[in-house]
Image (tube, rainbow, N blue to C red):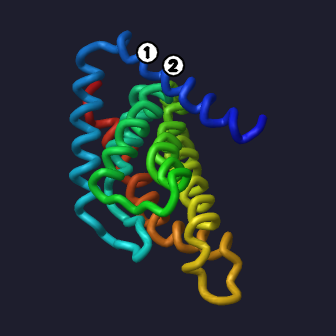
Amino acid sequence: MDLGTAPHLFWLGICVIIMDVNSMDTRAKVEIGILVALALLLSQIKLLRMPQGGEASLEMVPLLFLALRRGAKVGFLVGLVYGPLKFVLEPVSLHPLQIILDYPLAFCGLGAAGFFAGISGAWAKAAGTTLGVLLRFLCHTLSGAVFFAAFAPKGMNPWLYSSLYNASYLAPAFLVALFLLPYLLRKVPE
């Protein structure tokens, strides 16, 4: 697959997800809207803010909650909606591909937690949360190594710098989500 094909496949996937929205019940659509709005609100309460973008906040909790509760399709849709909204509120832009990696793709990555939606047990929720955050981390790390390499200290490998930079704010947010999600998923009625 060449680089010219990748955007077409990305947009094809988006069209498939959007067409599936019509089959959702009203309750699911309302839940998505409320929890995306909550994620945006929680993103404004920063536990740690990084100089070139990225912050530790509770924004991932509602997004992962939706993916783990409603499945991967909803999780990907939520990331697709949330990413551009996050960019509008807090834009960090060096290149169009960087915007795609850091916003819609990174937050769609969280939607992969939904692959564990139908599996009961705390381990499944932990595995889903881990997968989602890992995919978000990979998107941000790729973006950082390619587009933010100039910020790496002299002599430091840009991939190592990007990995450490992104882990420094995603790891605390991941641990909080890992702790909160099993409790929320048990306590919030379907």
Badge 1 amino acid: Met
Work out whether 116 lies above or below 153: above
Give the Cα distance between marks 1 and 2: 5 Å
**Can residue 88 be seen here?**
yes
Give how far across and how far down residue 83 sits, in percent: 39, 45
Q: Which mark is residue 100?
A: none
Give how far across and how far down residue 34 sits, in percent: 21, 35
Q: Which mark is residue 19?
A: 1
Badge 2 amino acid: Val
Q: Nearer the viewer, residue 158 or 109?
A: 158
Give how far across and how far down residue 155 sits, in percent: 70, 88
**What residue is rendered at 32% in x and 56% in y?**
58
Work out whether 129 lies above or below 116: below
* Residue 154, quarter of picture: bottom right
Give how far across and how far down residue 169 sits, in percent: 44, 68
Which image quadrant: the N terminus? top right
Q: Residue furthest top?
A: 23
Give the residue number, with chain letter if any, for mark 2: 16
Q: Residues within 10 Å of mark 2 (few under 14, many from 20)?
A: few
